[in-house]
Amino acid sequence: MNAMRRLLEGAIIGCALVFISPMIAQAVTFAGTWAVSGRLGTTGSVSPVCVFRESGIAVSGTCKGPNGIGSALGAMRGTAIEWQWHVTRTDPQGYSGIVTFRGTLGADGVIRGSWTFAGEAAVGEFTAQRVR
């Protein structure tokens, strides 16, 4: 009787693993390096490379663009992410301020969404791709 029970328990555990494994493999993560590219109207653009860490739903790290560098802080919920880049200009062409990104990770692995620069009324679009 014990041998039959162990066999049945093993079969149940095996079936559970078969069903759970794909869900675990599909867990969304924003941790890593992302190349961001965005436009704001006809004159504004943004193109930092951001490196994120995760802790629960919190996202933190740094972003560095051609004209600025700074910390990044935000949150994620499912496939959605929002972060603020506290950018300090590194040359006269750069700007200092807060850039806010809001996006969703698509099935293709690309984050797409909108971004704003503090003090500007315009809203731009951006994409971000994971750097391997």
Image (tube, rainbow, N blue to C red):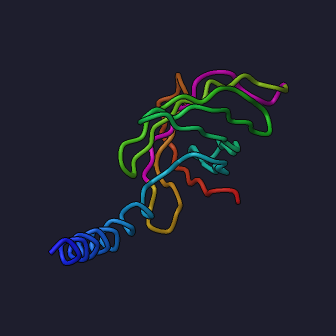
Residue 70 figure quarter: top right
Q: Using residue 95 as the reference point, say whether residue 60 is left or right of it.
A: left
Residue 26 figure quarter: bottom left
Residue 48 figure quarter: top right
The residue that appears at 52% across and 63% down in the rendered structure is 109
Foreground residue among 98 and 2: 2
Figure label count: 0
Q: Using residue 41 as the reference point, say whether residue 88 is left or right of it.
A: right
The x and y percentages for residue 25 are 45, 64
The x and y percentages for residue 21 are 39, 67
Range drawn in magenta: 92-104
Q: Using residue 44 as the reference point, say whether residue 84 is left or right of it.
A: left
The residue that appears at 23% across and 76% down in the rendered structure is 3
The residue that appears at 53% across and 48% down in the rendered structure is 30
Foreground residue among 117 and 57: 57
The residue that appears at 84% across and 25% down in the rendered structure is 92
Query: In the rendered view of the protein, which quadrant contains the C terminus?
Result: bottom right
Foreground residue among 45 and 73: 73
Q: Main secondary structure of the magenta part?
A: strand
Query: In the rendered view of the protein, which quadrant contains the N terminus?
Result: bottom left
